[in-house]
Image (tube, rainbow, N blue to C red):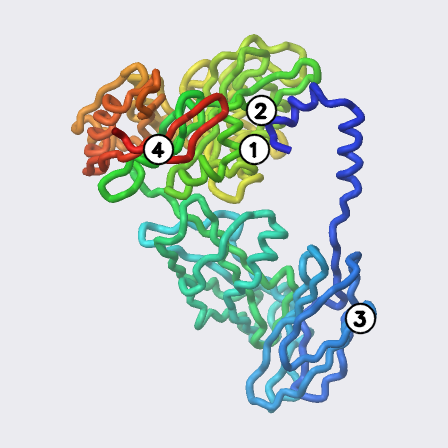
């Protein structure tokens, strides 16, 4: 079900239909799988007894794979392993993988001693853990370089030296996507050099030195896409792992490193957002770094007493067809934000209670995840008075708007693995945000912690406050439909020299024949800004994209006559 219908459908749907849907959902059963024992198998070079693994699953059949030197036989719910003798002078490593339907596979590492050893030296079968900061995205620089840091720890001081080597486990991608729900691609394996990537815990120590891995991507990696670097630790000496402690999964993304960025509010009731693709600099990069879909609404359903995210037919059409109209922008390096606006009822961006802000922020974040968006932009306009005494609402204030911005930032981070941003247009009650205390931890946060940038009204610039620097402020705002704002090359160069991070554009429409068409006057100003900010002109545009009706857009490019 699309998010646009969640609350709209509540008004019209019958109780019987909702009950049926709930029953159907309750009947869904997830595939399960567990194996005992599931620890690393430490084997002697020869004369190993058969190993039995007990498999528990609710799936009718299960399968397994094993190294060629291990023969497995299924016996009911057991997997019996026969181990061939190791006749070479090097240790052998492998992995047994057991699968059942869509359940998360169980993978068990296997270590066998070299021929000259009777058995591996593993004091007390010491369990180790790979430690890495994999919670944050790793960004590549302009040359597609990045670095990852990994170390190994144990609970007690090592009785002997312990070692593990790191490998690139490409097969882990499908498992990671299934378990995490993160739609990522595999990082180019040739860009990850693990030839000498060995972690060593010295005798008497509890952790290894931190190993820095330098990786290199390439120009074929798309913007708006996460790439998985799946690192797996394999035992080398005196150490073992469980499947939960042997991995470090990093997500790598490309980052826009421009000093000054351009953000464009598209009036999507009039214009197809694909038009942003046509305006590129001489080096082939897009002029616009971000577009805002103006706008979705915050609405209140008085019958069901719920504040919900409302999308008009034009916004919803773009979201429903995100792969056609929005993802091409993101792949070109243009971020896509959902604009949020009042809609003439009791709900408003600066009049939700603390609880109400938290609840609505979760719904908005879910929409950004579903439609693969890069965040939100708030414009506090067109709301009527709140219903005082209702648990959703409070008196309109900048503090309430600040709370919503904070809750949006928090919810977006929880829902989306890719970088997401919260920004706003300085208007209504939302000019300057105040500090906000987290409702659960009580920790106080400054605006710099939850506002990525904010833009001023036409003809003005926004200025630093609350820990924000000029990199989070707009030097100027242009209203292209009404012709508000001119700019010389020298003035635009001054934006960069003064340290501003953004320039705002509103209502660009290059489509011939449209009643709001403003292509020629707009491109003239855009060219001056491009030369001032980037020392480049715009390439001549070749095509435009049509909006053909209510909730209808055309993905076909049309040549200018």
- Report how far apart the C-alphas of labels 1 and 4 lie in the structure: 22 Å
Mark 2, secondary structure of its residue: strand
Residue displayed at 73% across by 78% down: 81
Asked where in the image residue 499 lies, by quadrant, the reply is: top left
Q: Which of marks 1 and 3 is nearer the N terminus?
A: 3
Residue under numbered circle 3:
78
Categorize mark 4 by other alpha carbons within 10 Å: few (<14), some (14-19), many (20+): many
Q: Nearer the viewer, residue 449 or 43?
A: 43
Confirm or deny contact between disc 2 and disc 1 (CB under 8 A): yes
Residue 138 picture location, percent across and down:
44, 50
Q: Earlier in the sequence, mark 4 or mark 3?
A: 3
Q: Is residue 193 above or below residue 13?
A: below
Mark 4, secondary structure of its residue: helix
- Report how far apart the C-alphas of labels 2 and 3 lie in the structure: 51 Å
Q: Which of 247 and 448 is in front in this view?
A: 247
Residue under numbered circle 1:
367
Q: Earlier in the sequence, mark 1 or mark 4?
A: 4
The label nearer to you, 4 versus 3, is 4
Q: Residue 217 carries which label?
A: none
**Residue 446 can be seen, yes or no:** no
**Image quadrant containing the C terminus:** top left
Categorize mark 2 by other alpha carbons within 10 Å: few (<14), some (14-19), many (20+): many
């Amino acid at each position: 079900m699309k998010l646009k219908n969640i609350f709209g459908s509540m008004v019209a749907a019958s109780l019987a239909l909702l009950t049926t849907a709930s029953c159907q959902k309750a009947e869904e059963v997830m595939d399960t799988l567990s194996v005992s024992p599931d620890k690393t198998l430490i084997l002697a070079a020869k004369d190993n007894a058969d190993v039995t693994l007990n498999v528990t699953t609710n799936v009718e059949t299960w399968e397994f794979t094993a190294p060629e030197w291990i023969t497995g036989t299924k016996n009911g719910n057991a997997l019996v392993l026969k181990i061939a003798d190791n006749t070479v002078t090097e240790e052998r490593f492998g992995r047994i993988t057991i699968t059942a339907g869509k359940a998360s596979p169980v993978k068990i590492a296997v270590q066998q001693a070299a021929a000259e050893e009777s058995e591996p030296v593993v004091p007390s079968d010491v369990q180790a853990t790979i430690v890495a900061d994999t919670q944050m995205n790793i960004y590549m620089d302009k040359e597609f370089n990045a670095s990852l840091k990994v170390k190994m720890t144990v609970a007690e001081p090592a009785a002997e030296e312990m070692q593990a080597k790191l490998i690139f486990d490409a097969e882990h991608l499908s498992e990671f996507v299934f378990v995490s729900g993160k739609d990522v691609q595999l990082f180019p394996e040739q860009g990850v050099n693990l030839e000498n990537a060995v972690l060593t815990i010295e005798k008497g120590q509890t952790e290894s030195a931190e190993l820095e891995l330098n990786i290199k991507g390439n120009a074929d990696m798309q913007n708006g896409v996460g790439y998985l670097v799946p690192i797996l630790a394999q035992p080398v000496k005196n150490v073992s792992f469980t499947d939960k402690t042997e991995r470090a999964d990093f997500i790598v993304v490309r980052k826009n490193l421009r000093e000054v960025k351009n953000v464009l509010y598209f009036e999507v009731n009039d214009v197809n957002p694909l038009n942003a693709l046509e305006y590129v600099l001489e080096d082939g990069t897009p002029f616009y770094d971000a577009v805002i879909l103006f706008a979705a609404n915050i609405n209140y359903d008085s019958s069901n007493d719920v504040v919900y995210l409302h999308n008009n037919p034009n916004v919803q059409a773009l979201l429903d067809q995100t792969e056609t109209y929005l993802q091409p922008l993101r792949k070109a390096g243009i971020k896509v934000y959902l604009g949020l606006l009042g809609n003439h009822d009791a709900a408003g961006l600066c009049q939700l209670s603390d609880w109400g802000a938290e609840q609505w922020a979760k719904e908005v974040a879910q929409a950004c995840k579903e439609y693969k968006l890069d965040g939100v932009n708030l414009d506090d306009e067109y709301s009527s008075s709140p219903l005082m005494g209702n648990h959703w609402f409070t008196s309109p204030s900048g503090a309430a708007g600040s709370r919503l911005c904070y809750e949006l930032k928090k919810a977006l981070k929880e829902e989306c693995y890719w970088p997401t941003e919260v920004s706003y247009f300085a208007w209504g009650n939302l000019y300057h945000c105040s500090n906000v205390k987290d409702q659960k931890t009580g920790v106080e946060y400054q605006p710099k912690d939850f506002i990525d940038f904010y833009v001023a009204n036409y003809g003005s610039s926004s200025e630093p406050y609350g820990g924000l620097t000029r990199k989070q402020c707009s030097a100027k705002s242009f209203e292209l439909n009404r012709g508000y704002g001119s700019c010389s090359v020298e003035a635009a160069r001054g934006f960069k020299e003064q340290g501003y991070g953004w320039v705002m554009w509103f209502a660009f429409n290059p489509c011939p024949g449209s009643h709001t068409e403003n292509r020629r006057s707009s491109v003239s100003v855009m060219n001056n800004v491009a030369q001032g900010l980037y020392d480049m002109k715009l390439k001549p545009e070749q095509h435009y994209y049509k909006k053909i009706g209510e909730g209808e857009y055309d993905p076909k490019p049309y040549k200018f006559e």
